Image (cartoon, helix red, strand yellow):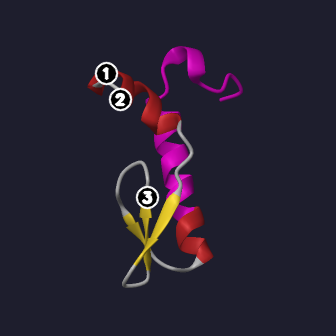
């Protein structure tokens, strides 16, 4: 994946989380650490969704907004 491809595709990818020790999860997209609670992971995933909506090219934006 080139840098150009990564900058256009990664914001729209669904993040996955890898459990690390000490107990925390690492985001597969940004490398950010989240807490161990389910709400922490949901919050971080929603952050990625909001960022993707803000950065979406004109063709990918939600027409209802």
* Residue indicated by mark 1: 4
Callout 2 crowding tier (Cα within 10 Å): few <14, some 14–19, many ≥20 = few
Nearer to me, 65 or 8: 8
Question: What is the span of residues highlighted in magenta in the rendered image?
Answer: 43-65
Q: Alpha carbon of mark 2 to alpha carbon of mark 1: how far?
A: 5 Å
Residue underneath mark 3? 27
Alpha carbons under labels 3 and 2: distance apart: 16 Å
Toward the top, the furthest residue is: 59
- Picture coordinates of residue 55 (x, y %)? 44, 31
Q: Of the two numbered discs 1 and 3 on the same chain, state the one appearing first in sequence.
A: 1
- Residue at which label 2 appears: 7
Q: For residue 64, which quarter of the picture?
A: top right
Examine the rendered structure and indicate whether residue 30 appears above or below residue 22.
above
Query: Which secondary structure, mark 2?
Result: helix
Mark 1 and mark 3 in contact? Answer it, CB < 8 Å.
no
Is 64 part of what is drawn in magenta?
yes
**Furthest-right residue in view?**
64
The local secondary structure at tag 3 comes to strand
The quadrant of the picture occupied by the N terminus is top left
Q: Do the residues labelled 2 and 1 touch (CB within 8 Å)?
A: yes
Residue at 37% x, 23% y is: 5
User: Residue 53 colored magenta?
Assistant: yes
């Amino acid at each position: 994946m080139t840098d150009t491809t990564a900058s256009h595709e990664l914001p729209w990818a669904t993040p996955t989380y890898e459990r690390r020790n000490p107990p925390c999860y690492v985001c597969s997209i940004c490398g950010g650490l989240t807490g161990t609670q389910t709400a922490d992971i949901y919050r971080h995933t929603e952050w990625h969704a909001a960022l993707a909506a803000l950065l979406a090219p004109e063709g990918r934006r939600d027409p209802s907004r």
